[in-house]
Amino acid sequence: MVTDTLVLALARMVEEAIRGEQRWIRWAIETGATPVKRCNCQIVIGEEGCVCSVELALPRAYLIRAKRRLECGKFVGIPPHKRRCILCLRGEHDLDMTTRVTVVAHDDRAINEFRTPTPAHRSKRNDRERAEKAGAHLAGTHESQVDAARDYARERRKA
């Protein structure tokens, strides 16, 4: 049973996620930084799945449109989510073992079953080499940008 409180909590969560992305894009445009997002390759081959962790720059066309919309005071739009690095597009996936996940109903009946990659623990050197080959950024760049955008927004509110 879904309660009104749960619906309101989910709605606030979605609004805050959208607000966070808008804050991140605004920060990137105002500071001249290049916003990046993680490679979204979800390929599974047998019992292995792609765990590529490079981060790609957002398309310039999106940033140009977002800058124009920001100048008008409009919603800048949601950045493209389904982007893959050049290595994954070429078929040079960073494969690692997957884990079987079973979705179970309240009466212990299996509803769905799928395989998901386990978090890969690669060395910084390996991540750096893969990012350089892909012409992308290192893993963790997006998180540091989001943190910087949050700090930037706080400073603007204080001023």
Image (spheres, helix red, strand yellow):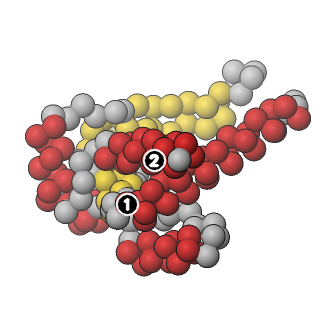
* Distance in Å between CA atoms under marks 1 and 2: 10 Å
On the image, which quarter does residue 137 sit in?
A: bottom left
Residue at (58, 67) in percent of width and height: 77
- In front here: 34 or 154? 154
Question: Total label count?
Answer: 2
As drawn, 98 above or below 58: above
Is residue 115 something one can see in this rendering? yes
Q: Quadrant of the N terminus?
A: top right
Asked if the residues shown at circle 1 and circle 2 are in contact, with their CB atoms under 8 angstroms apart, the answer is: yes
Q: What's the amino acid at mark 1?
A: Thr
- In front here: 114 or 60? 60
Give the mark nearest the N terminus, 1 or 2. 1
Q: What's the amino acid at mark 2?
A: Tyr
Is residue 130 toward the left or the right of residue 35 in the image?
left
Residue at (18, 44) in percent of width and height: 127
Instruction: For mark 1, give the secondary structure.
Output: helix
- Report x, y in % for residue 101: 50, 31
- Name the outermost residue toward the front: 159
Is residue 87 something one can see in this rendering? no
Disc 1 designates what residue?
31
- Report x, y in % for residue 34: 33, 62
Residue at (55, 42) in percent of width and height: 158
Instruction: For mark 2, give the secondary structure.
Output: helix
Residue at (56, 70) in percent of width and height: 70
- In front here: 51 or 101? 51
- Report x, y in % for residue 93: 25, 53
Say which mark, if any, is on residue 152: 2
